[in-house]
Amino acid sequence: MATQSQGIKQLMQAEKEAATVVANARKKKAQRLKEAKEEAAREVEDYKKMRESQFQEQQKKFAGSKDDFSQRMQGETQKKLAQIAVEVEKGKGAVINRLLELIMDIKPEVHQNYRQNEQ
């Protein structure tokens, strides 16, 4: 009987050791999963930062080109306004003379549709 109880004790001891090994394996698995999630979260955060920096660079390039375009258009507008002002100054005298000529040289004529009453 002693051998039987000793065999049972060995079996119980083996079950306890197996339960401990399984528990430790589960803990290690849970720890590895936790570490994998943390690493994945870090990788996602690093990727987000990288993409955000690329986006900021693109925006700076676009905003810079937008500002350059705006400045270039404003410069062209100023040139055109200056050119128009020069042309106005050139033609101003001729326009004033023509207006005065039309206003001052009145030629009274009877309109072609006017009928005189015959009496």
Image (cartoon, grey):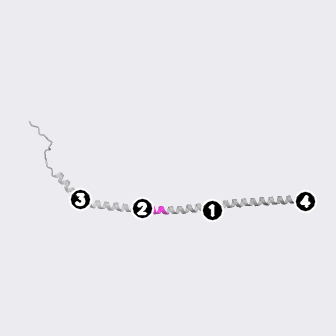
Q: Which residue bears the numbered disc 4?
A: 2
Amino acid type at mark 4: Ala
Label for residue 91?
A: 3
Q: Check if residue 54 falls in the magenta segment.
A: no
Q: Residue at x 60, y 62 (%)?
A: 43
Q: Where are the magenta residues, as a range?
A: 57-69
Looking at the rendered image, the quarter that the C terminus falls into is top left
Q: Quadrant of residue 42?
A: bottom right
Judging depth in this view, the residue of 81 and 20 nearest the camera is 20
Q: Residue at x 42, y 61 (%)?
A: 67
Amino acid type at mark 2: Asp
- Which secondary structure lies at badge 2? helix
Using residue 96 as the reference point, say whether residue 11 is left or right of it: right
Q: Which residue bears the numbered disc 2?
A: 67
Amino acid type at mark 1: Glu
Label the magenta part by its dominant secondary structure. Answer: helix
**Pair 1/4: label in front:** 4
Graded by Cα atoms within 10 Å as few (under 14), some (14 to 19) or many (20 or more), the crowding at tag 3 reads few
